[in-house]
Each structure stands twice: as C-alpha cells, then as structure tokens.
Image: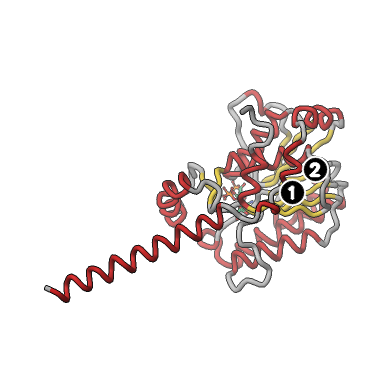
Amino acid sequence: MTILVCSWFNAAALLSLLVLSAAYLLYQLENPDPQTLPCFRMSHDMDALRQSFKMLNKSCFVLGASGETGKELLEEIIKSQLFSKIVIIGRRTLTFEDEMYKNVIQEVVDFEKLDEHASAFQGHDLGFCCLGTTRSKAGSEGFVRVDYDYVLKSAQLAKAGGCTHFTLQSSKGADKNSSVLYTRIKGQIEAAVEELGFDRYSIFRPGILMCDRQESRPMEWAARKVLGPISYVFPTAISIPTSLVGKAMVNNVVLPLDKKVELFENKVVHTLGKLGEQK
Ligand SMILES: NC(=O)c1ccc[n+]([C@@H]2O[C@H](COP(=O)([O-])OP(=O)(O)OC[C@H]3O[C@@H](n4cnc5c(N)ncnc54)[C@H](OP(=O)(O)O)[C@@H]3O)[C@@H](O)[C@H]2O)c1
C-alpha cells in the first residue's frame, strides 16, 4: 500500500513538473523581449497609409492562392482594394463563386518548366509566396522540390520581371543549419531568396496554422485539437489563424520600409495582422 501511494505521489509530482515547465515555456514564447515587437510602427495611421498606397496603382501576384493561407491572403488583398492588378500563379485553374474575384487574373504554369512561363512573373511590383507541400504528401525530394526549388525559381523570375517587394511565408523555427529537413529547407530558402536582393523582402515565420483544413492531415489535425485550449490561454505562443497571416502580409505592404529584409516571428505576425483594427 505504501509503495502504491509513493509511486502515485511520484507520478503526480512528475506530471506537475512537466505541466509547470510547459506553462513556463509557453509563457516565455508568449512574452518575448518587447524590443523585438515593431511598436514604433504601430503608431502609423493605417487608413492614411492605405490611401497613399492605393494611389501608387501597384500590381501583385500570389503563389499558393489555393492553399489555406494563400486563399485568406487573396481574399484580404481583394478586400483591401490596394492593388490595381491581382494575378494568381498556380498549377491549376481555380473556380471562384464570389463576384469579388472577377478581376483576378489566373496564370496556370508548369512548375517543372517555370522558365517557359517567365512572362507570368513579369510586371508585378509585389509578390507573395504561400507555396508549400509536406513530406508525407510529396516525400522528402518532392518537399524540397516545391518548398525550395519552385519557390527560388519563382522568386528569381519575379525579380527579373521587375518585382521589388517579395513576401515569403516561411515557418517558425526556420534554420538553415537545422538537422530537421523541414526547418532546414525553410531556413535555406529564406537565405537563398535574400541573396536575390529584392528592394524589400519580408519573411513571415508563423507558428502552427489554425484553419479548417480541407485536406486530411491527421498529425496536424491532432496538433490543432490539442493546441485549441492552449491557444486560448497563450494565443500568440505557438499558433496563428491563417486569416491573421493573410491580414498581416497585406498590412505590412503599406507600412514604410524599415529594413530591406524584414523577419516576422509568430507573435509579431499576430500584431501586424491586427494593425488598424477598430478597437
Ligand atoms: N501547416 C502549418 O502549420 C504551417 C506552419 C508554418 C508554416 N507553414 C508553411 O506555410 C506555407 C503555406 O502553408 P499552407 O498550409 O497555407 O499551404 P497549403 O494549404 O498546403 O497550400 C499549399 C499551396 O502550394 C501549392 N502546391 C503544393 N504542391 C505543389 C506543387 N507540387 N506544384 C505547385 N503548387 C503546389 C498548392 O497548390 P494546389 O492547391 O494546386 O495543391 C497550394 O496552393 C507552406 O510553405 C508551409 O510549409 C505551414
């Protein structure tokens, strides 16, 4: 009996320690050094900035507009009315029911022969890239092909075509020296695109994407279920709704240039996504 009580007590103590450690870690992630937040940029009058941006009649393209983040981004781009021309570049034609998509131009390309589609990337001021696949879907080689090769080639063609501001959706934990394939490729593609020397290059590193994903991804689904309550208590620590990523990308384009290369971690993406919201 005494042994049973002792082992129960040990298990409970270990569990409490684990929960406390996890809570501490989440608290740290939720509250990073405040100096890393672009507070000075939040003082801008977003309405005025949007108005000035509109006057510039800029055009943009979106890669990955059929994906979970890409579709939120496209909706936000259209609703913002910031651009005089919107082009989506993808491997298939998309069908839109809503009238608001009627002016969106679609370029269907073969990503294995992107050089043959250079014209699709010409003449855009801004480019947004939300392209990506998973290892479970495409295998390791396929993942590298899409998340590195396709992204880099697209960025090269965009640069050659006159794009001055390129926005890349990368991921939390991206690190070109990582031993984990996913984070390593994300870090490597961030660095490779940086070398192209866009006038402005914005890297977004969101955490786990919260959305109602159409495609079955059991691991991601399970993670989202577990994360649901955690995200409620620590909303910016490890996850972010795709809608907020889209809003953040659009808000960022109207903000004055701070640094040529901007790197936005998950918490800052939350902040950017809410800029200009009515209180
Ligand atoms: N899942 C997460 O929690 C998470 C977290 C942080 C960052 N990210 C990263 O964020 C980015 C966007 O993620 P997401 O979940 O929003 O994307 P998603 O829903 O998986 O959509 C991916 C997009 O890439 C396109 N694509 C995939 N494979 C392709 C191929 N072989 N050829 C051409 N196009 C292809 C898809 O086009 P089709 O519709 O034609 O397939 C779709 O438009 C990805 O780079 C991802 O790694 C994800």
Q: Is residue 12 left or right of residue 123?
A: left
Quadrant containing the C terminus in the rendered view: top right
Q: Secondary structure at mark 1?
A: strand
| Residue 128 in picture, x, y percent from top left | 72, 45
Examine the image and state in which quarter residue 248 appears: top right
Pointers 1 and 2 in contact (C-beta within 8 Å): yes
Residue type for callout 2: Leu
Q: Residues within 10 Å of mark 2 (few under 14, many from 20)?
A: many
| Residue pictured at 80% horizontal, 32% vertical | 49
Q: Looking at the image, is mark 1 or mark 2 earlier in the sequence?
A: 2
| Residue 218 in picture, x, y percent from top left | 42, 54
| Residue pictured at 68% horizontal, 68% vertical | 176
Marks 1 and 2, Cα distance to the nearest angstrom? 8 Å
Mark 1 within 8 Å of ligand 1, using the beta carbon: no
Residue 33, above or below 49? below
Q: Residue furthest left?
A: 1
Residue type for callout 1: Thr
| Residue 216 in picture, x, y percent from top left | 45, 50
What residue does disc 1 label?
167
Q: Secondary structure at mark 2?
A: strand
Q: Residues within 10 Å of mark 1 (few under 14, many from 20)?
A: many
Q: Residue furthest top?
A: 99
Examine the image and state in which quarter residue 191 appears: bottom right
| Residue 84 in picture, x, y percent from top left | 80, 30
Looking at this view, is 129 or 275 the one in front? 275
Which disc, if any, is residue 126? 2
Examine the image and state in which quarter residue 182 appears: bottom right
Mark 2 within 8 Å of ligand 1, using the beta carbon: no
| Residue pictured at 84% horizontal, 59% vertical | 196
